[in-house]
Amino acid sequence: MLVASDTSPISNLAIIGRLDLLRTQFREIWTPAAVELELGDLPHPLALASVRQALREGWIKVRAVQGDRIIRLLEGDLDRGEAEAIALGTELPADLVLLDEREGRSAARRVGFRVTGVLDILLRAKLRGDIPLLKPELEALRSQARFFIAPRLEEQVLRLAGE
């Protein structure tokens, strides 16, 4: 399965010490150059080290986007990383795009992609037995990564996880 990713799923999982879940679930992740630049600016030293290790090991891969037509169309509504991740997804072609922000997810779906994000990845990990509980991971996202989770969405995800 070819997977393209924006910065947020990678950085947020790295911040809470769960970057390995991406490798477990997808084996390899493709990112555009803008995402590589954003990941290089992570203010959390351990998260930055784990991302650099994944890049050295080659399971997070970087590929420059060849055309900029899609990027130009999306940049009015999305940040550069999101726009490039969607554009890279069209060039690979990816089976799935990892995005967390609502606008990016909506744009990727309009292009025809299946989309998932950090909450889906954590839920899948819980259901597969890769993590024992989901609630502490959500709390870590909020406290360590400053990730916003709407209360209704949190309730829904925890219910799906059986918590």
Image: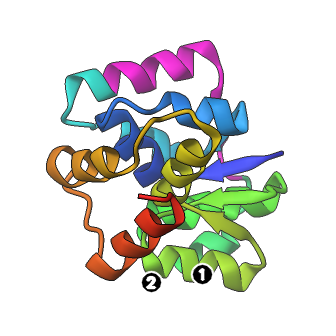
Q: Nearer the viewer, mark 2 or mark 1?
A: 1
Q: Nearer the viewer, residue 62 or 106?
A: 106
**83 in relation to 16, above or below:** below
Residue 52, visible in the rendered structure: yes
Q: Are marks 2 and 1 in contact (CB under 8 Å)?
A: yes
Q: Which residues are magenta?
A: 48-65
**70 in relation to 142, above or below:** below
- Classify residue 152 as left or right of residue 132: left
Q: Earlier in the sequence, mark 2 or mark 1?
A: 2
Residue 40, visible in the rendered structure: no
Quadrant of the rendering where the N terminus is positioned? top right
Disc on res. 77: 2
- Residue 69 percent across, percent down from the top left: 68, 73
Disc on res. 107: 1
Quadrant of the rendering where the C terminus is positioned? bottom left
- Classify residue 109 as left or right of residue 100: right
